[in-house]
Amino acid sequence: MHLHTTELKQNIPNLYKGQRILLSGTVFTARDAAHKRLYGLIDEGKPLPFPIKDSVIYYAGPTAAPKGLAIGACGPTTSGRMDRYTPELLDMGLAAMIGKGQRSAEVTASVMKNCAVYFCAVGGAGALYAKCVLSSEVVAFEDLQCESVKRLEIKDFPLTVAIDCYGGNLFQEARDEKPEAG
């Protein structure tokens, strides 16, 4: 299924755990340090450096661009490190997150409450993902270097729905199917 970020919010109810999509459009990168700063801005009542409503955050810290590419390696980081910040961002209108690994029960509940979605990208495939990035621009926290917030324009970025808006959760399903030791 091909989706564009401008159509994502209205299509979230049509996405189900395990479904594979190719995402195109605008996403914003933000990892641990950037999330901490975003949260500080929220606490201070200051505006965020990009619109949260209906946006997609990619938990990534892309490397410098080699010749001929818009960006260097651009693989996902472990999403759980952003769990403490995620429910508030979802309450502010964040539509989707891209990362790797499982999320907390609080994040799953917030995904359901806010009709959002969590996508997983394949870890270790950063060089391949870089080929899906058409452009990259730093929009905030330049001093964080690779962890700065960047606006990426992506095309046909391969993802899997890991947590859907109904609470379908690939990670929970895997735990439930795991045979008992013994």
Image (tube, rainbow, N blue to C red):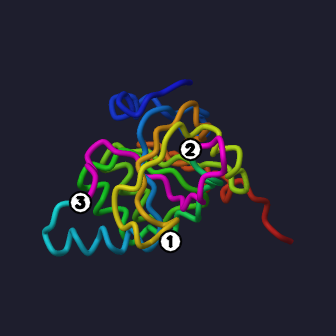
User: Tag 3: Cα neighbours inside 10 Å, few (<14), some, or many (≥20)?
Assistant: some
Q: Secondary structure at mark 3?
A: loop
Amino acid type at image mark 1? Arg
Q: Disc 1 or 2, which lies upstream in sequence?
A: 2
Q: Residue at x 41, y 48 (%)?
A: 151
User: Which residues lie in the magenta part?
Assistant: 48-69
Q: Secondary structure at mark 1?
A: helix
Disc 1 to disc 3, C-alpha distance: 20 Å
Amino acid type at image mark 2? Ala
From the viewer's side, name the closer residue of 19 and 166: 19
Disc 2 to disc 3, C-alpha distance: 25 Å
Q: Disc 2 or 3, which lies upstream in sequence?
A: 3
Residue behind mark 2: 70
Residue behind mark 3: 48
Q: Secondary structure at mark 2?
A: loop
Viewer-side label of 2, 3:
2
Q: How many marks?
A: 3
